[in-house]
Amino acid sequence: MITISYEELALGSVLLLLNGVVSLWFRTGMAVTLVVSSVRMVVQLGLMAYVLRYLFLTQMPLWTLLAVVVMISFAGYEVMARQKHQIEGGWGYGIGMGSMLMAASLVTTFSLFVQIKPDPWYDARYTIPLLGMVLGNTMTGISIGLTTLTTNLKQERDAIETRLALGHNKWAACETVVRQALYTGMIGIVNSMSAAGLVFIPGMMTGQLMAGADPIEAAKYQALVMFLIAGGTTIGTTLAVFLGVYRLTDNRHRLRLERLILRK
Amino acid sequence: MGKSLFLKGVADLMINRGTLSIHGESRETMKATNWRRRVTYVGAKTAWWHEKVIDHFKDKEWLEAVVAEVDLSPKVIDWNVSRLSSGEAQRLALLRALEGTYEDEVRYFLLDEPTSALDGGRQSMVEALFNRFLNANQIGILFVSHDERQVERFARRHWQIYDRHVREIS
């Protein structure tokens, strides 16, 4: 495998300057965010690398578990931080975190025991990257699903309340909104599955190819990861959307949008 | 207190502290969906959730028979809801609420300015339709109106909400 030096990496970051110039010139208001997020990216990846190196070396299940918990917590936080209308109180974080935990742990455990079977099964070299890929995509699905849900509940409020007034139960009244939320939450993975291999080579496969793996083996791995991501996104998005409806309605079949707060 | 808020409270669409019952059966022991089938709120604004008018109804034959009573052509049944004028939408929303009213069960309607988008002639037609159901003892109506003449014409009892108090006017 060809290694890249720090100087070469620094030269690569010049491309960001381009982005910065465009942001400043057209006053997109993104210049500061760009600097912050690119610095974050480098620092986070660097930290992750050192943590992984340590985890691979020690093979301590407890440390791996800790890394897993930290990753899921950040993902749960990110989901809520991206919401414009946030469900108030502990429920807001609970829904994001809970759906993420359920989806990611189910799917990752499934692949560790059924397909990949590393020895020991909690081998950090497999656990952490798998979880990372599933989390990243599930997080997007959940956050888009919840955003669509809350936005459309607000927008369709009159129609939903009319249905409730006519005696429809809350699930029937929210049916079109739920359908839309599930659809937008899951369309991303569907699109990337149909484009994979034709329009782009997915990141993991690229990595394996560059590291010298056989293309067939790399393709098999990538397909498996796509299945895992699709499964994780489905579980996570569905859970989050239904928990969201559950919290934004009550047992007297009323819409409770006052439980939604505008995030500053 | 606002009239709409009061009606929504009665229909249990909003958190409220009142105690209500129908023929001895209290609201809290009934399922909320059943309560609202018996005590149905129809708001001043109409809302639709399917593409076509007919998709909002269960009984096409009944609808075809009844539309003429409120001066609507049977053609509107197959229209997209986006084509409806506010007056057409208002009359169809009333029919939508009335659908499924049978002789064996009295239903109560909480109507929030139900004829606000209609001219005088069509207001009378809607009132006549209500009167047909009322005279058959199939429905009871609590009707909010800002139109004094309509109140004169249609109301059997008359209350006013003024300065947070409800007062019956004889």
Image: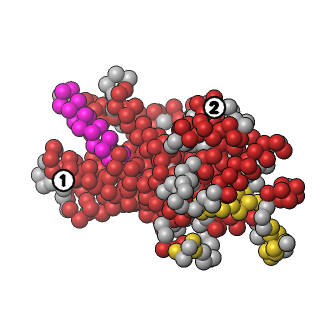
Mark 1 neighbour class, 10 Å CA radius: few under 14, some 14 to 19, many 20 or more? some
The segment highlighted magenta reads A215-233
Q: Residue B91 location, x and y as percent? A: 69, 44
The CA distance from mark 1 to mark 2 is 70 Å
The magenta stretch spans residue B169: no
Q: What residue type is labelled 2?
A: Pro
Q: Which amino acid does label 1 sit on?
A: Asp
Query: Most prominent secondary structure in the magenta stretch?
Result: helix
Q: Which chain carries label 1?
A: A
> Residue at the spot x=48%, y=47% of the render?
A175
From the viewer's perspective, is residue B142 above or below residue B59? below
Q: Which of marks 1 and 2 is in front?
A: 2
Viewer-proximal residue among B109 and B106: B106
Q: Quadrant of the C terminus of chain B?
A: bottom right
Instruction: Residue under label 1, please give it.
Output: A123
Mark 2 neighbour class, 10 Å CA radius: few under 14, some 14 to 19, many 20 or more? some
- Residues at marks 1 and 2, common chain? no
Instruction: Residue under label 2, please give it.
Output: B74
Q: Residue B6 location, x and y as percent? A: 70, 67
Q: Residue A143 location, x and y as percent? A: 47, 49
The magenta stretch spans residue A226: yes
Residue reaching furthest to the top: A198
From the viewer's perspective, is residue B126 above or below residue A27? below
> Quarter-wise, where is residue A214 in the image?
top left
Residue reaching furthest to the left: A119
Q: In which quarter of the image is the N terminus of chain B?
A: bottom right
